[in-house]
Amino acid sequence: MVPPIAGAGEEQEEAGQLVFQRGKKLNDEYYIVSVRDNAEAASVKFTAYELESSETYDISYSYADFDALFKIHPELVNPAAKEGRYDWVVDRLDFAVDGLGGMKRLTLVGEPTTGDEVDEAKGPSGAAKPQHKDRLTYSERIRLRQEAEKLEEKRAANIALKAEKARKQFVADLQEKRRLEELKAQARRQRIDEERAERREKAEMQKHIDEERKKRYQENEKKREERIQALEEERRKRDLQAIHELIQASEERKAAMQKKLEEARQRKREEELAQQADMKAQKALEAKVEAKREQQIAEREARVKQAEREYLAQRERQIARIGQEKLEREERKRAYLKEKAAARAAALREKHERIEAWEQSEDLRTQNNMKKERARDILMRDHIESLRQQFEQEQAEAAARKNASIKERMEREAREAEEAAEKARRNAELEKKRQANIEKRETQHQEKCQTYCAKIRDMKTAQALKIREQADAVEQAREKTREEKMRETEFRAEQELAAARVQAQREENIRQKEMERDRKFAAMIKERKQQEQQAMLEAEARRHQKRQAEKELAQKREEQEQQRRRQVQLLEEERDAKIRQRASERNKREQSRIGAQGASPTGG
């Protein structure tokens, strides 16, 4: 079962359009069950109104939960079967008591609740359904026809009332919309006028600003030209200073170069001395290495010879010991040992030969190395002599060039000194004239600046006054607009309040009328219930008599069936007895026939 959104209240509020209504008996009390469909909240609300205490209980379902109730009922799955769905839910409504507060609330149970036997005789609107009879009397047909005509008249009256109500509501809405559109158009026109005035003011202000900007641009252009002239003069000064600095840097570089040449010559002399010392040390080290190598070779030869002697002595001792130990062995073994001894001796000779060949190759390599070193020493001495002669020649040429360059430089420096003195005199005269021009221009510039500052100050004062006047005008216009909007808002609020009061009064009247109608309908339902109960009692009595008669008839049929069964049983017993009797007779005949056949051959 889908969990509903349940709630109870003493007074029912409208929660949508009334779509269904019928009576129901719950816990021996009569209720009017109303169904309201709220399209805005997408929910269906069932409200039970008690006739005696005027209490109401309600239970609500969303559209999705309400559709989920009928998934297992094929005849109610279609959402178009609304009345059938409402009847199904109303038949299964019951009360449950909360465990905490003991309050009753309306719930939905799985099976139809008690008292629905009476409800089955009602139609979708709560009216009693006609009992199905074989034939209707004339008065019943007249009554049914009159009720149908009244229902049609009532339905037509309701439709006309709703149509008139809808028309009035539409006319009121249309008038309200027209009034709102007129107010919006008026506000739009006012806003357009204000925006046009603001744009005109902004255009005039922008024009003045552009004129002032153009004047400032012209004055700034004059200042820029004056600044450019000053910068060009400063650049000429910097160029002269850079030329002097270049001359001085050139002289410093020449002095540094001369110093570096002297240092290079000194380093070269020191390197040559160090190279000669290194050569002497290298020769001494090579002689020492050669002596050490020859000593190691001699020691190695002595060790090899000593190892050979020791090996031969040890081998002889082993041979003697083996011969002593194996005197008793066979001659073949002794011959084998002699062959092995001869092979070892041959291997030893080969080893000695290899050692001697290696020593000869080492001696030859040492002699070749000594020859190469002697030839290299001769080449190195010749190269050093050639370098010394070349260096002395370069020194003589450099001294001659140096003397010539010194003489030429002294003459050039004398000429440059004379030119520098003449240039300094001309620069002093130009500097004096330039200072006079600068003082004159500075005086003119200060006068122009004072005039410009006074003019700008007057312009800014006038502009500030104008902006203040414009701001005051805008503020006054905004204040006026704000007051008009407030008056309009208050007027609209009063209208809405009056409309709300009228609407509340109208809804209260409608609610009173509906409650009065529900009370009358409940009284009518109660009277019909009593009549239906009386009819049900009479029908129950008739059904009881009918059941009693059917019970007696069933007992009679049962007795007849039992009697028939006894007769059938007797007939079955007689048939079995006859079958046994016939079988015995047949057996006797067979035995007599067999006896007769056995006696005839014996007699022959």
Image (tube, rainbow, N blue to C red):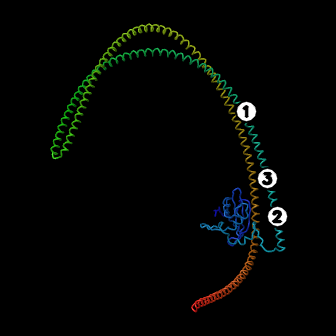
Local secondary structure at mark 1: helix
Element on which disc 2 rests: helix
Disc assigned to residue 401: none
**Which residue is pictured at 71% across the width and 40% down the height?**
479
Q: Is residue 580 left or right of residue 295?
A: right
Question: Which label sits on residue 152?
Answer: 2
**Label located before the other in sequence (3 or 2):** 2
Disc 3 and disc 2: Cα gap in Å?
A: 26 Å
Q: Which amino acid does label 2 sit on?
A: Glu
In front: 158, or 445? 158
- The amino acid marked with disc number 1 is Arg
Q: Which residue is drawn at 77% across and 73% down?
A: 132
Specify few, some or many for label 3: CA neighbours under 10 Å numbering under 14, 14-19, or 20 or more. few
Assess whether mark 3 and mark 1 are in contact (beta carbons under 8 angstroms): no
- Give the amino acid type for the residue marked by disc 3 in the picture: Phe
- What number of labels is visible? 3
- Residue 187 in the image: state x and y as whole percent: 75, 42
* Label whose residue precedes the other's in the sequence (1 or 3): 3
| Quarter that holds the C terminus | bottom right
When the figure is inspected, residue 498 is found, relative to residue 394, above or below; the finding is below
In this view of the protein, can residue 544 be seen by the observer?
yes
Which dot marks residue 170?
3
Please report the residue visible at 76 percent of the width from the left and 63 percent of the height from the top.
514
Residue 503, percent from left and from top: 75, 56
Q: In this view, does 177 lie to the left or right of 206?
A: right
In the displayed structure image, the side of residue 146 where residue 371 appears, left or right: left
How far from the left and from the top, in percent, is residue 410? 43, 8
Residue identifier under label 1? 200
- Cα gap from disc 1 to disc 2, whole angstroms: 71 Å
Camera-side mark, 3 or 2: 2
